[in-house]
Image (spheres, helix red, strand yellow):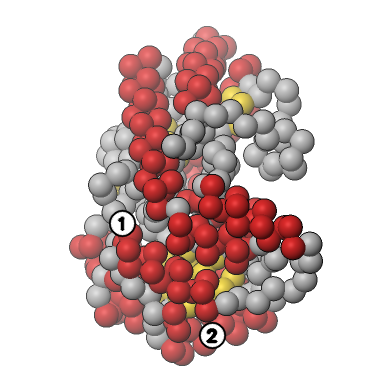
Amino acid sequence: MFDFDKLTDRSDTLSYKWDVKEGELPMWVADMDFEVAPPIKSAIVKRAEHGIFGYTATPDAYFEAISSYWERRHGYKIPTEHMIYSNGVVAAISSIVRKLTTPAENVLIQAPVYNIFYNSILNNGRNVLSSDLVYDGAEYSIDFADLEEKLSRPQTSLMILCNPHNPVGRIWTREELARIGSLCHKYGVTVLSDEIHCDLTVPGKGYLPFAAVNEECRSISVSAVASSKTFNIAGLQSACVYAADPVLRHKVWRGINTDEVGEPNAFAMTANIAAFTECDGWVDKMLEYVFENKSIACDFINSNINGMKASFSEATYLLWIDISGVATDSVDFCEKLRESTGLYLCDGAEYGECGRSFVRMNLATQRSRVLDGLERLKRGAEQYTKDEK
């Protein structure tokens, strides 16, 4: 029904991901290479045929579609009156950092984590305070003693939670989330939960929205969700932020509107409503395909590339690869990998110093490209090892 093996040429489309040299294979930024689900394409084409693309309103149908989708797929009904439209999750995060904190305050993150969090914090004159995740050689966990110490600092006012976590792929448990909520409530820290990867979980395994854990978590949090990763429509610049607490929600609303990042483009509403109401079947098949890619990649790396280790994670279409047996500086490794093989990956140092001996690989692409990328990674690792001797 859906052909995820179809190779669609993205050159000459102003693609941020595919603006590369001929012969290069980009597997870096979190952007799928799959064509959108048919209902989304049909809705956009129909809207385009109208021929007028003026200022666009945010209809109730948009929020209702999100609420229905979350209840259907995640077992949590978000009241529509708790929702606020934003041009994107990143735009919302930066706006919320500005509105809910003051310059020189600490914003806590859990490195290695999405690199743009650092930008949103530092560019607004706040301090990055990381409670690094603990890596045991196979998976990551939270150091709750360290987390509590840093949350307790008087200047810590906001925690940005990545749920599920990018890039390590952890789905946080109810117990972990409840403990985070309890600590943040204890020390008066607001939680901003970035849940943009929430749908991208291994088939049969769901994620738990932070606000759904308990009343304590719900009352102290703002959550950000979007269709962009799941449905591959990041270029339409749309997201939704929600908060149960009315005072917190009003502050977020004021911040987003002060920054003028609360108005949709002419195609955003049409595409989102179609995505959230008509595309569940496409999502299910996409997840099967992507996580088969992840399984194939893990098996290949662990069996064929000496000095590298890939652990199968239950969330995101991204693979976090430990390259410490080949290189300790992922920046240098990725530069030389691209030069020698054309494979373009993200260096782990982008996500914090504790990620320096890792690379991130995007597997939301056609199986043939995944296999090609793995062979290039193998060749590049062998060449790097040879050159370093």
Horizontal side of residue 14 vs 194, given as left or right: right
The quarter of the picture where residue 256 lies is bottom right
Label 2 sits on residue = 251
The quarter of the picture where residue 182 lies is bottom left
Label 1 sits on residue = 207
Residue 27 rendering spot, x and y as whole percentages: 56, 33
State the quadrant of the N terminus: top left
What residue is at 36 percent from the left and 31 percent from the top?
Answer: 292
- Looking at the picture, tell me which residue is in the foreground, 191 or 81: 81
- Looking at the picture, tell me which residue is in the foreground, 203 or 101: 203
The disc labelled 2 sits on which kind of residue? Answer: Lys
**257 is higher (above) or lower (below) than 337:** below
Report helix, strand or loop for mark 1. loop
Residue 381 can be seen, yes or no:
no
Residue 20 can be seen, yes or no:
yes
Report helix, strand or loop for mark 2. helix
Residue 174 rendering spot, x and y as whole percentages: 23, 62
